[in-house]
Image (tube, rainbow, N blue to C red):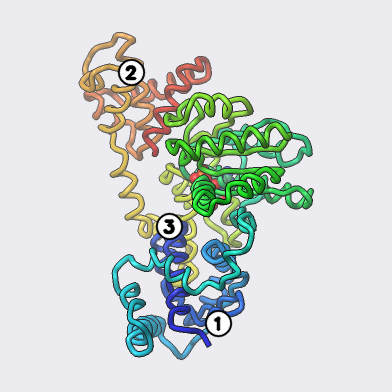
Amino acid sequence: MKSVEDSAVDQAEWDRVKSRLKQEFGESAFKSWLTPITVATVRNGEVELAVPTRFMRDWITTHYAERIRALWNGENPSVRKVTLKVEAARNAALAEVAAKEKHAEKPVAQNSGHVINRMTVPGATSRAASARAATVPAQTFTTPLGADLSAPLDPRYVFENFVVGKPNEFAYAAAKRVAESDQVSFNPLFLYGGVGLGKTHLMHAIAHEIRNRTPERKVVYLSAEKFMYSFVRALRNQDMVSFKEQFRSVHVLMIDEVQFISGKDSTQEEFFHTFNALVDQGRQIVLSADKSPSNLEEIGDRLRSRLQSGLVADLHPTTFELRLGILDAKAEQLGVVVPQKVKEFLAHKITSNVRELEGALNRLVAHAQLVGGALTLETAQDLLQDLLRAHDRRLTMEEIQKRVAEHFKIRVSDMSSARRSRAVARPRQVAMYLSKQLTSRSLPEIGRAFGGRDHTTVMHAVRKVEELVKLDTAFAEDVELLTRMLES
Ligand code: ADP
Ligand code: MG
């Protein structure tokens, strides 16, 4: 039989999995699909979840179960399987209340009582590591450090599911090359770009492909945070030798979000040595970050130049066409028909990143399936109101004017002044162009915000910038940089 602490640990793990799910799938999908889930049993590496209806069971099984399993496995490597059952008799809300009561009561009745503190202190569940340490079987601690070195891969993140367009074709091609060649192609491959543009997706895709093609090659994928964690743990356990050996026995090492490595001197140093050792042995390294190596401020020069010595490929902010393509692909994956108008609406409005775009689509589809209504432009506008408002709020034309003025070192007031010298006219055109691209304002509205100019002036500005971007790489970089900064 399971002890009370065991169930508390299960619950704490589930809470952490849930908060990850919420981040990944968004508030709305989370509320509709994930809050009603309760943990029925956790036994022999198998988690059984209970949901109130059969429909929910099927939906969650096809859309979320694999992700739940992967996340849970990340929390607790012994968990290998997740199944769902219907508990029709029980109302989900009641079940949750009952579950809470159960946790609140039992420790008092049967145990020392410190568990109850953990369960009732807000936020304490996320710090329940000590509870876990107390109940995880001892053998976990004696398994070699590297046994769970690699983080689980998301099975959806494969090359086939990656939609290629202008903004990401270079990064895609580079990733493909690394995945398909048995020799080291570029070392390291350094992928960078803003949040939600597909870095992690491409890294997982490389790992999947290499594991499929050449299972004998050891591929390790992990986040920079996890790398640091393993490093610090090895230091504490005085186990550096096997730590190093483990990394050095790897054929392909992939570290996601290396911006988190910057700053920590000793970790950086270790990273550098591990890196050099692997490169010297002809092993492939793939890294990602939210900035290019030259913009990673906190890393040392030696590491920086090392990072630049391979191929640096960036993922640019998405274009309308790419967003549309992604929506087509996702709708097909979900097996639903989404009217063109709705897709265009989403692609036009949700420009910040692909994750949000996916989230919005999931939300619409879930709603349509739940209430059985048709997916129309009106329902889309209605359902996504809060999201769209948040977007509009996030990026105002004032903000754009301010940032662009700063960037080109002119006064904000010149955005609406009558001055026509190139030094202010060009930045003004850029700001107009960005207002058109990044907000949902109309041309006349934009004209008004720029000192009451005519909409044809705005149109001219947009064309001019588009033209210059093609001709002048330095200018294109300015625009790119500004776009990225404003969208983040
Ligand atoms: P990043 O690591 O750059 O923050 P992710 O790789 O996590 O971004 O991507 C966020 C989400 O968007 C993922 O679900 C991913 O599958 C999806 N995504 C991003 N780019 C594409 C693309 N080009 N085609 C299909 N899906 C994409
Ligand atoms: Mg990522």
Which amino acid does the dot numbered 3 rest on?
A: Gln
Looking at marks 2 and 1 on the same chain, the residue that comes earlier in the sequence is marked by: 1
Pointer 2: what residue? Answer: 408
Q: Which residue is mark 1?
A: 85
Q: Amino acid at mark 1?
A: Lys
Measured in 3D between alpha carbons, the distance from the residue under mark 2 to the one under mark 1, in whole angstroms, is 60 Å
Tell me, for residue 436, which label it has, or none: none
In this figure, which residue is indicated by the disc labeled 3? 23
Looking at the image, which residue is at 69% across and 45% down? 250
Q: Is residue 302 above or below residue 200?
A: above
Residue 74 lies, in percent from the top left, at: 55, 61
Report the front residue among 140 and 290: 140
Is label 2's Cβ within 8 Å of ligand 1?
Answer: no
Residue drawn at 39 percent across, 39 percent down: 488
Residue at 52%, 15% in the rendered image: 471
Mark 3 vs 1, N-terminal side: 3
Element assignment for label 2: helix
In-image side of 366 versus 448 (left or right): right
In this view, 444 is above or below 46: above
The residue carrying pointer 2 sits among few (fewer than 14), some (14 to 19) or many (20 or more) residues within 10 Å by Cα, namely: some
